[in-house]
Structures are given as structure tokens and as C-alpha cells.
Image: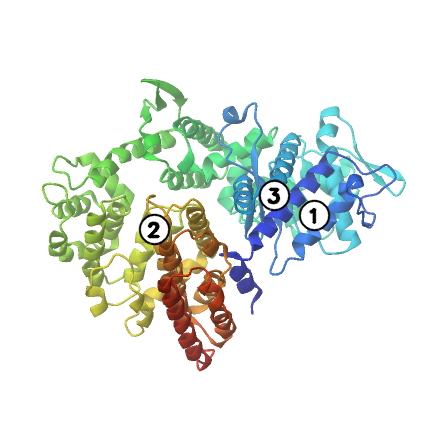
Amino acid sequence: MPEEEVLIRESLYDSHGRSEALITLLVEFSHVLSACLRSLPAADETPYAEETTIDDPLHLDPYRQISKSILKLADRPGIKGPLLIRVKGVSSVERHRGSRPDYEVLFSDIVMDRQSVARMIRRKGDRLAYLEALMSKAFDTFAAHDIVTFFLRMPENSPQAMGLVRYAVAMLAQYKAALAGNTDILIPDRGRRIATPVMRNEKNQPDVNLTLLAGLNRISVEAMGSLVKEVCEWITQSDASAGAHRYASVYNAISGVKNLGAKLIKPPLEVNNIQWLVLNKDQNKLPKGKAQVARIVLDRYGHSPLEQAITFNAVYGSDFAELSAVDLGQRLKRVSELLSAADDRPKKEMITDEIIANLQWRMHQVGESVLEQLSVEGGKARLFHADHWSDLGPLAPGIARLLGFYCDRRATHYKMLHIGDADVRFQSRDFEILAREFDMSPLDVREIIKLLKSCFAVNGRFLRPGFEDNVAAFSLHEEKVFDILWHYLKQPLPREDRLAFLNALQLYFVKLKRPEKALEILLDDFLARPNDVGFSDRNAIMLANLLLRRYNKELEIEIEITPEEVFLVREGLNREAAAAALMMVDQRKEAFFEKIRSIHRRLLEALETSQTETADMGLKYLLSLEREIHIFVALLGGDLARSVLRSALNEYGFADAELYRLADSPQTLEALLNHLKVLLRGVGRTGEPADVPVLDFVIGQRDEFLLLSREDRHAAMVNRVMEWAARIKSDLQGRPVTEPA
């Protein structure tokens, strides 16, 4: 079985606590690393020395423990890749003045932060409360050492490789004090002390990574100065070519160029390398546009790693949906400063396009209640607070236009949400905004809005017959019209209107010549925020399931969720659409898997707090959402489906899984067992003989499942599920491994 599939199967639903075990190890590593930063190796010890085992907890030397902690992480099955620690949630210097930043630790597919640790403590009990104290102490230490990012390449299990890690950590522990006192970093080494001065970059700014590079390679200040000058000249000369402009800093260029990097010992860790604020930990180089923006940020804020993070986050942050109006105004001012600084750059046009495009994409995520408090007048941002408007300061022309557009867009969106109300009137500005948003002509937008308004009664309720009468006219604008339809449908709607709209769309889908475009819109929206669960997510996947099928009798029924009968659809599957959707998901596999984890975490929280029927996004909604996802991947087929469904079956097919222990009513147990039946049918559609042992395990759990309740209805449900498992097992035993799903 491929290593990647093992990783997916063990991590998506985590019935056996894999993520919690890794989170615990990441807290331990962070604690040991912070202990190293708060101390130095003993005077007679060298960080290169081979580690010995110390069992007395009162006399632990963190430098002798850090490689042990690393090995615990590296020895986990299916684990690969580096470890990354970075700040999170930084919005402005003003917000963080007087307080310390928060952090997240990323390793493999696991994120350790305050939220994940608190969630684990809630689930496992106060016996793990000590982890929160260790994590907080570690995060405080990172902040005290001005660490914004800490990137560790997992070393080989050898004394020399582990020694390099300890040596680099020992240098980092002294770096801030050496910088403040204008002294050398002194590292004990075989009875003597090796002195390394703080190295500086081409702007004469202290550089921790150049210092680590110099210390590990015994490079003098003069030699490092010559190297920095040479590389800096190469970067400057290459700014008009396809070479060095991909590097955000001189250090990155030194470590990235083969003929330089091959001659030097590359530090096993990097600290405050700006690229790790935005790069996935498994990537290694910034795209050229981001690299150019990073250079401006480093030039302007080289004195403060936190300022660098705040400024880079102003363009590339993933938290725009959580910003206040004040935070957004400050970010826009920062971005305006960056645009002004780009005026004298050879790549000015590239930088401007990069900043505006990224900011525009993120402004889509800003809450409309936030935009309601902002406006633009005379090129200045204004904030409404305490019953009056106040100036936030001037913005660059492009940023002012962008903010003005989104403020106006908020009013247009309000009209779209209430499009069925008789007193809602669209003006020319509304058509211009929608035309820009959906890349259509204002005339076409005007026509579509007119058609859409005719689908509502005078009391504002949706009329399915009116929509069906307009299907042919809507189809004339196939390339764009679904954008507008989806914008309306993804808003919270009364149940009757939502069901009527969903069912009316079936007839529209039949007319689509290119369902792939609608699938792209739905999946983009679904994956836009992989760490969150939204009200529109279920509609998005249910509509995707509709789009994957060609029209047949099964589609004529009224639907609120996708019926199980779709598992039988073979000839009716739109294979072109399925192939396109599979490619879209594969390109964003990490976001797709994280979305699955987010949904299941919310489901467990709903079980834990008994949010079954009362909450809008309670257990009923979350189970139906997971169900739609499992049907979706089953229709797509292939390795993706097998991995996701096997992982889910490991959870739902285990009677002692936490979700069954949290079930507090017969109705909840029945809903979970129904979900297990859907999973079994999904495995029956996509599985292969290799799945038979998993089915044997589920069948062997019959008695344990029966013990979950003494009710006759429960026993009958368990028996039906086991009958399905036995039937699917029999089918899979005679199925060739290569049979397509």
C-alpha cells in the first residue's frame, strides 16, 4: 500500500488518535526547543557530542533531548517532510503591542496550535492539561527570541546530523543577546569555544540565517561580506531575467544555487526566513511575484521580523474573513506603502499586479459587516465608529479603488440576497459591479437579473415554475450564469426556497454543455476556506453530485440530499465531468483533505455538545455534509475515493470509536449507523479485493455494535448494516483489482 495512502487513511478521521499522538509530540518538541533557547550547552560539552540517555527528569539537558524528540517525530509511520513553526493571527503592530504573537506548528498533515491542544484536552480530560502549559511556555520563548518562523529539515539519524541541529540551536539561543550586546556567539566545541560574529546582509542588517551559515562553515566576517556582495550583484543583474528574481533574499540565493550550496554545509534549520510565512512547508522556492514583494518587505522592515510578518500578511494572509474594520484599514495602508515602494523597482509592474491580484482575491473573504464600517472619500479610507466617521489615512489609488468597489459591492450583494423582494431595485452601478465580479457585460447581467427576479412571487418566495420557464434563456449565458445563481443559492435561505431552488436547478443542469465550469465554481467555493465549515458547503457538494450525472429518471425526484441509489449509476455517470472534478480535487488535495478533517472535527464537537437538532450547523447538517462528500468521492472513483472511504470506514466501522461513545440518543446511533451503511455502499462501488480485511473487521464488530443499545430497533439496524457489509465483501472478492470504479 502506498505510503501516502497509509497517511491519508490514518489521518482524515483519526479514530485511533494518530493526530493527538502527533500533537503531543509536537508540544514536546516545542517545549524542548524552547528549553534549549533558554539555556546553553554546558561549558565542557559540545553540541556535536553524541547524545546519551538521561532518565532522571530533574537533570534533563535539553540539548541532549532535542534529537530524541526529533526521532520520535521522524519514526512515526507514514510521516515525511520538514517541520515548520510560524506566527499566526498577526494583524497589526498596534494589536500586538504589549502582547506576544501566537504560533502554529506544522508537521506532516498535522497542525498543533492553541485550538488543537485545547480541543484534545477537552476530549481526553484534564490529565493532559500540562500540555497547554508547556505549549504556552514554548510560544512565549519563541516570541522572546523574536522568532517569526522556524523551519527544520528532518535530519538523518546520525550523530553528525543531530549534532548540526544542536549546534545551530545553540547559536540561535545566543543570537539575540549577541546582537544586543554587539558580541560574538560562543559555542563550546571539544574543550574550546568557537566564536561567530553576527553576520549582516547587503543592507547591513543583521541576518540570523547568514549567521548560522557562517557558524556551521567557519566563515569569517570578511569572507561572508564578499560572498553577500557577489550574490547581491548577481541578483541585481538578473532582475530582468528568469534567474535570481525568484529569490527573496541573499541567503535564499546562496542556499538555492547549486554551485554555492554544494560547497557549504546547509543549516538544518532556518529562522525568520520570510518565505515560510506563505510557502507550504513542502515547497522550497517562492514564485517570482511573491519573491519580489518579499524583497520590498525585507528592505523596509529588516529591523523587525514581526513587522515583516504583519506586512507580508497584509497581502497574503489567510484570515481576512476574521478581520475587524480597523485591522482591514491598517492592512490596506500597509499595502499602499508597499505599492509606493515598488515605484523604483525594475519589476514594478509585476509587483503591482501581484499585490493587487492577491489582495483582490482576499477581499472577497471580508465580512460585509466589516465593509459596512468602511468607505473611501478623496483617496482616504474612512472608518465608522462610535456614531461618526473618522479618517484612517490616504491609500494608493489602486487600493482606494479596490476598497471602494467592495464597499459598493456590499450594497449590491444585499440586493442579490433580497432579489425576490418587490421593493429591491437594481441600478446601473449594481450592474457594473456584478459585471466586473462575474466578468460579463452589464447588458448581460441586466438580462440575467431580470430573469432571476421573475422567478419570485410578490411576497418574495421562490417560484420553481417561473425558474423552469426561464431555463432556456438562462442557458444562453451558460459560461457565466451559474456564478450568479450560485451566489444567491449559497446564502442562508428558508428551507422551502432552498429546496425549490435546488430541485429547479436539475432541469437547468440538463441543458449545460460544459458542467465542468459549474463544478469548478462549486469546488472553488467549497475549498476556499479548508479550515472552516460553512452553510453553503452541503449545497455545493450536493450540486456537484448532480453535475457528475447525466440526466436520467432518478433525477426527476424531489431531492434534499443525494439519494443512495447514485451508487448504482454507471452508464449515467458523466465521465468527462468526473475526470475534470477529479483533476480539480487532485490539484488541491491538501485543501480537500483539510476540509474533510475540519468537517469531522465539527461533527465530533457537535456530538460532544449534543448539538443535534437545535443548532443550524449541528449533527444533522454535518452528517449530511459528510455523506455528500463520501458520495462525491465514490462517484469520482480511483485512488482518492478508496483512500477517503477506507479512512472513514476505519472510523465508522469501529464500535469503540469516539463518535459512538459520544452518541447520546437512539436517534443519533441510528444516524451514525446509516452513515456506516452509506460508506459500505461507497466502498462497494469503488473498492477492490484489498478492502476485504477492512470489511471482515467491520463484520467482526457485530457484537460490539449490538452492545451500544438494547433496543430492538437498534439490533435490526445493526443486522441490516452487517448484511450490507457481507454482500459487499462477496462482491469485492470476485472483483479484479484493475476494474474501474
Secondary structure at numbered mark 2: helix
Secondary structure at numbered mark 1: loop
Please tell me which of labels 3 and 2 falls first in the chain. Answer: 3
Q: CA distance from mark 3 to mark 2?
A: 31 Å
Left or right: where does residue 707 sit relative to residue 423? right
Residue under label 1: 268
Q: Is residue 67 above or below residue 141?
A: below
* Closer mark to the observer between disc 2 and disc 1: 2
What label does residue 621 carry, if any? 2
User: Which amino acid does the dot numbered 1 rest on?
Assistant: Pro
Q: Position of residue 413 (x, y in %)?
A: 25, 38
Residue at figure coordinates x 24%, y 63% from the top left: 513
* Closer mark to the observer between disc 1 and disc 3: 3
Q: Is residue 67 above or below residue 406?
A: below
User: Which amino acid does the dot numbered 2 rest on?
Assistant: Tyr
Q: Position of residue 397 (x, y in %)?
A: 37, 29
Residue 138 or 145: which is nearer the viewer? 138
Left or right: where does residue 467 sit relative to residue 104? left
Res. 62 image quadrant: top right
Inspect this view and state whether residue 264 appears: no
Residue 688 or 142: which is nearer the viewer? 688
Which residue in the rendered view is the most extreme toward the right? 191
Q: Position of residue 145 (x, y in %)?
A: 66, 32
What label does residue 128 carry, if any? 3
Q: Position of residue 299 (x, y in %)?
A: 57, 32
Which residue in the rendered view is the most extreme toward the bottom? 734
Colour logic: rainbow
User: Which amino acid does the dot numbered 3 rest on?
Assistant: Leu
Q: CA distance from mark 2 to mark 1?
A: 46 Å
